[in-house]
Amino acid sequence: MDNNGQPFFKETRYAEVNLIHIPFVSIREQLSPDLLKEPKDPATLMLSLIREEAHRLVINLISRKIIFKTIELDLMPARMALYAFFILCGNSSQYPLRHYDGQK
């Protein structure tokens, strides 16, 4: 469409097309069997391979550290107590308490 919303046709007699080699990569072995039971579009198949890790905020009361992703913060005891207070007041079904044993 042109600026006035009218169909726009272009002469392709002088067009040049350049093709490049793209290697074929099979993802069949990475797909779950449920996805292979019936035909799916490529976008659905590719999105099924994307797995993002859920990041959790770890509050270690013993070592007085707060850890999120790769960031660790040392806290003073008073601030750590404040974090612990809010955790204990929170909704335990949505944010379950997990005991930290020092291992990842």
Image: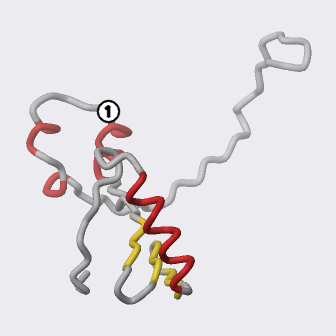
Q: Is residue 15 left or right of residue 27?
A: right
Residue shown at 35% from the left, 45% from the top: 47
**49 in relation to 41, above or below:** below
Q: Report which quarter residue 69 is drawn in.
A: bottom left
Residue shown at 78% from the left, 12% from the top: 7
Q: Quadrant of the C terminus?
A: bottom left
Q: Is residue 58 left or right of residue 25?
A: right
Residue shown at 85% from the left, 19% from the top: 2
- Position in image of residue 43 (x %, y %): 38, 39
- Position in image of residue 31 (x %, y %): 18, 50
Three-letter amino acid code of the residue under disc 1: Asp
Foreground residue, 63 or 44? 63
Q: Is residue 76 left or right of residue 54?
A: right
Q: Is residue 62 left or right of residue 35?
A: right
Foreground residue, 69 or 100? 100
Foreground residue, 55 or 72? 72
Q: Report which quarter residue 38 is drawn in.
A: top left
Q: Quadrant of the N terminus?
A: top right
- Position in image of residue 39 (x %, y %): 20, 29
Residue with the mark numbered 1: 41
**82 in relation to 61, above or below:** above
Foreground residue, 20 or 99? 99
